[in-house]
Image (cartoon, coloured by chain):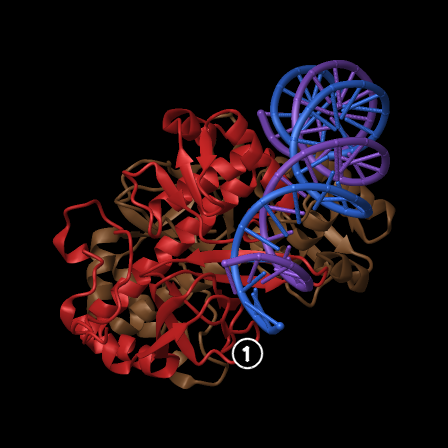
Chain colours: A brown, B red, C blue, D purple
Amino acid sequence: MTRRPKRELGPLIRTMPYLAAGAPEQAPLLTPKQRSQLLAIATRVSARKGQVLYREGSLATSLYICYEGMVKTYRDLPSGRRRITTFLYSRDVFGLAESGRYVNTAQTVVKSTCYRLPMDVLTAVLQQDAALQFVFLTKVTHELRQSQRRTIMLGRRDAAGRFAMFLMMMRQHGPNRPASNVILLPMSRSDIAAYLGHSLEAVSRATAQLSTQRLITFQGRHAVRVLDMPRLERLAADL
Amino acid sequence: MTRRPKRELGPLIRTMPYLAAGAPEQAPLLTPKQRSQLLAIATRVSARKGQVLYREGSLATSLYICYEGMVKTYRDLPSGRRRITTFLYSRDVFGLAESGRYVNTAQTVVKSTCYRLPMDVLTAVLQQDAALQFVFLTKVTHELRQSQRRTIMLGRRDAAGRFAMFLMMMRQHGPNRPASNVILLPMSRSDIAAYLGHSLEAVSRATAQLSTQRLITFQGRHAVRVLDMPRLERLAADL
DNA sequence: CGTCATTTTGAGGTATTTCAACGAAGGTGG
DNA sequence: CCACCTTCGTTGAAATACCTCAAAATGACG
């Protein structure tokens, strides 16, 4: 039962290239050397479900890279509402600060493992290693794109359409294989609502509607089987 | 009338530091040397009002830095709706590609001047110069924050509150001095609507409402004088 | 197997959207 | 310099969609 863990390879980062596929020097992946370089300054953090990794407004001492599991970042608004900023999967980066403080609170959605990198050390390393920094630059740019896509999603008025877009976004990320018709949604309905900017009830009705229309069917509360992918994609794209 | 232009200093970039104010090596400003370095690979582009700089989906050959004026980036949706992604002011960067293509269309809101930097050359330079790259990394991070703030803004249901937040965002950016009570809005009402995710009519009603409540008053269509800043700030923060 | 939190479903209230028409502004040409 | 035209912005009334409040049902967990 106490197997020795495999040799630790260090964090990975998921990115998208700036240039078209094929330009070799643009490959936005961490080399093994860079991974061990990051690993050298990183701390492995295991967190059970629902654990808070850092709080909004606290001093931003570390940057995080998700290795396994799922993390959400959110802000609680004065009205008591909660807005979820992002869901983070394996190989996602989070905890970028602004003026030395975290802008969001980070909490695990399920049992997760992350790497924690001291910000001061990391920035120093990045200032020295342009190639490594470029991976981060590419990553943040990718996050920016994601955020802008989400903004477009939030422009939709209909709850069902918004949820359909959410499904399509979840299909590509995380533990979901694009090929599969099953999309895993580890987070709760209220998390989805807080992410989509809808009420919990609206999300529930949206899923009910899509189920009634035989576009999807739930296998438990955290797994969606897509019954009619073309129609779902059409609904998601119809904005 | 044909005065010789001042010595050209090259582009500037507006950023926010990761670390708390005071950490010297984090100062995210371009040094004069870096500015001239960028200037060496840059082309100055002057564009009249309404000119398209690049189109969504076209090959992303260049990165842009706004020097003067105002640029909007947007996507036209299948439904015919237009969603404005960002408004860009002096010292803002735009045109970051994804897989070699632009994700948005960029068009000037008013007469503008920008620097255009060839992507391939720039990425090569960034790979060499970690300090310069760090300015870009900081900038993109800042843009990501802005995008996330906007997402929160879009979560609001009431048009007046959304517009109030928009005003507060515009107050900090661009040609507006935070001290002044006058906020310039160079863009059209439909641009604002496309940015806020509302209909043109909703925006119009929102401005009318704020005017009736004596929170603001319009001096022409592109200048807002704030009459009651505390109340406006409270409205903007009440979400 | 019981308890508790989460999710679903129902009904009414409210805000924006839409459609339509009017009014204002800006630009062009005579 | 004025008239015209086109675009943009404002206002009104009905339709739509979500939000809120409330209660029942489902599922998770010990």
Which residue is denoted by mark 1 in the rendering?
Answer: B58
Q: In this view, does A206 lie to the left or right of B104?
A: right
Q: Nearer the viewer, residue B239 or B128?
A: B239
Total number of numbered labels? 1
Question: Is residue A198 among what the camera can see?
Answer: yes
Q: Nearer the viewer, residue C17 or B123?
A: C17
Q: Where is residue B61 in the image (x, y as percent from the top left)?
A: 44, 81
Residue C22, percent from left and from top: 73, 42
Compared with A114, B47 (above or below) is: below
Q: Residue at x 29, y 74 (%)?
A: A131
Which quarter of the picture shows residue A205? Answer: top right
Instruction: Mark yes or no: residue B77 visible.
Output: no
- Mark 1 Cα-neighbour bin, 10 Å: few <14, some 14–19, many ≥20: some
The part of the image, by quadrant, that contains residue C30 is: bottom right
Figure check: A14 above or below A167 = below
The image quadrant that residue A33 belongs to is bottom left
Q: Where is residue B1 in the image (x, y as percent from the top left)?
A: 23, 73
Which is more toward the observer, A143 or A69? A143
Identify the residue at horizontal 46%, vertical 74% (top origin): A17
Is A95 placed left or right of A192 in the picture? left
Expressed as whole percent of the image width and height from the top left, the position of residue B141 reads 36, 56
**For the residue labelled by badge 1, is the local secondary structure a helix, a strand or a loop?**
loop
Kind of residue indicated by mark 1: Ser
Q: Which chain carries label 1?
A: B
Q: Residue at x 35, y 51 (%)?
A: A96
